[in-house]
Amino acid sequence: MKTMTSCEFNMDTACLELRYADGTMISIDCIAVENQVARNMYEQSELDYLLYNDPVGYADLILNGDVIEYLRNVTDYRPLYERE
C-alpha cells in the first residue's frame, strides 16, 4: 500500500495532485471529471465542494468510488417547471 504524502489542488492546472512516499504522483484533471459525470449545476457544485473542502475524499471518490451513484444520492435536482 502506498503512503500519500500530500494531496492538493493546483489552481493553475485545475488538477488535484496526489504525491506518494515512493515518489510517484497522480494528477486528476477535475474539469474532465466534471465534464464526464456532472449532469447539472448541482452535481458540479457538489464536486467543487468536495474538491475544496475534502480533497482526499474527492480523490478517493474518483479513484475508488462510483461518482455517478454518489452524485445521484447527494444531489436533489428538480426542474423548476414540468415540460408538457
Image (tube, rainbow, N blue to C red):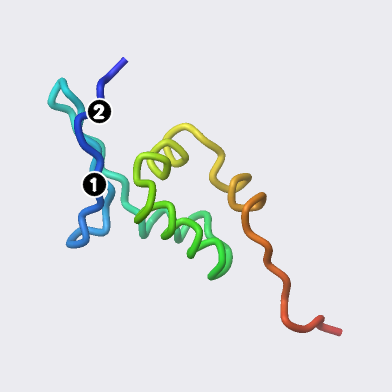
Name the residue carrying label 1.
8
* Displayed quadrant of residue 14: bottom left
Q: Residues within 10 Å of mark 1 (few under 14, many from 20)?
A: some
Q: Is residue 26 left or right of residue 70?
A: left
- Along the viewing direction, whichever of 38 and 3 lies nearer the viewer: 3
Q: Circle 1 — which element?
A: strand
Q: Residue at position x 25%, y 21% from top?
A: 3
Looking at the image, which residue sits at the far right?
84
| Amino acid tagged 1 | Glu
Q: Is residue 3 left or right of residue 53?
A: left
Q: Is residue 78 left or right of residue 11?
A: right
Q: Residues within 10 Å of mark 2 (few under 14, many from 20)?
A: some
Name the residue carrying label 2.
4
Q: Residue at position x 26%, y 52% from top?
A: 15
- Along the viewing direction, whichever of 46 and 67 lies nearer the viewer: 46
Residue 42, percent from left and from top: 56, 66
Q: Residue at position x 77%, y 83% from top?
A: 81
- Count the labels in the image: 2
For the C terminus, the image quarter is bottom right
Looking at the image, which residue sits at the far left?
23
Q: Circle 2 — which element?
A: strand
| Amino acid tagged 2 | Met
